[in-house]
Image (spheres, grey):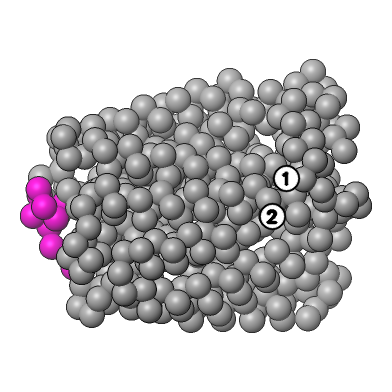
Amino acid sequence: MSNSKTANPYLILFALWLMMFSASSQLIIMVPILPEIADTLGVNAVLRGMLLTAYALSLGASALITGPASDRVGRRKILLYGSGILAVTLTLHTVAADYELLLLMRLLAGIGGGMLSGGTVAYVGDYFPYEQRGWANGWVMSGTAFGQVLGVPLGKVLATGFGYRWPFLMFAITMALATVLIWLFVPQPNADLDEEPLTPRRFLQKYRYLLGGSEIVAAVLAYFLMFCGFGLFTSFLPTWLETEIGISGYSIALLFAIGGTANVLASPLAGRISDEVGRKPLVVWSCLALGLLCAVAPALIVGFTSASILFFLAMISVGIRISPLQSLMTALVSDDKRGLLMGMAISLGQGGFGIGSFVASLTYGPFGYTSNAMAGALAMVLMAALVHWGLPEPSLSSSDSPSPPPASSQSPSVAEAP
């Protein structure tokens, strides 16, 4: 393994990119293959929604613990363990012959996913200076977009033709390769680590002190709303398109490829632009645009063409907001608390996705997809307001260390957290 002085940053980004491609694809694939799972296992909408909710809640609990743990043991170990756990668990999905086993596998996969979700963003924050984090986060997060272009459509085709288990085996292979690349090419960054032992009492103290800052509360609530809105809008979108609009499963695969292409184009570009003009404007305006698209989707989607146009625009909005928001958040705390913050944010975010998916499963049957879309739109507007009024915009004129938020907006308890 290369050390941090000789490591190639492009190899680091590729390893993290492949890991993000695999981790996000195995999550996103659950949405378009829910009809195949329903046909194979004979489960209703509520039980299908629980597969999404179980993973999200498991991921959230894992991130809540492993986030601060990465501040103590280092990001590299967390990324290695998380990718290895997820590779093994995805392989075990192939033997999930009934609903209960599949639900268990999703819970186990969430543990590995929780280790990776916050650890990846925290690693970028440790390794890259603040003025480059938008660019670095943009490329890493484009792995999610590329998953929509290639991984998710291919997984949907495999599930439609051969069964829902095959996509998980495909992503197990790519995750195993990512684990090897992390082992070989991703070093432990030269960042300050928390030297105090991690006890349950200290875990609680660290989170309590962290939440003493109003900007931290705003950041994690924004993350919650971002994922809650995504769960509300997307969980039953493929089901609605297939059953109500008459779009085939293979066309759904193409739809995700189109949306992923938009994300591939938007995410790195947004990261680079945010390095120049600031993070907040991109996040706020993309949230408002996505809220509008969610609200009008049920009325405007009448076939594959209209669905493709709206989904393309929606995924551009998604791609624009994620890397600037993550880059902004990495500047809110010091190195030894970055995992703590991202662990909390990811935990609440995935909790939001789980809640959004569960609410969508309850309202889709009696009220239809319009209720899901309108609730998702409301979440996006609330997120825009929270980011605009609740988060500071750190200085971009830093070198290796970001400029902290103004003293008046940073709680002393956060800066002095144990």
Characterize the local packing of mark 1: few (<14), some (14-19) or many (20 or more) Cα atoms within 10 angstroms: many
Residue 415 lies within the magenta run: no
Up/down of 356 relative to 305, above or below: above
Residue 238, image x and y in percent? Answer: 23, 54
At a point 56% along the width and 81% down the height, the residue shown is 177
Q: Quadrant of residue 18?
A: bottom right
Q: Secondary structure at mark 2?
A: helix
Image quadrant in which you'd find residue 214:
top right
Amino acid under disc 1: Leu
Residue 340 circle label = 1
Q: Residue at x 82, y 50 (%)?
A: 198
Report which quarter residue 36 is drawn in: bottom left
The residue labelled by disc 2 is: 66
**What's the CA distance linking mark 2 and mark 1?**
8 Å
Q: Is residue 242 magenta?
A: yes
N-term-proximal mark, 2 vs 1:
2
Q: Residue at x 58, y 20 (%)?
A: 389
Q: Viewer-proximal residue, 336 or 354?
A: 354
Q: What x and y, as percent, mark residue 194?
A: 87, 50
Q: Position of residue 223 (x, y in %)?
A: 54, 38
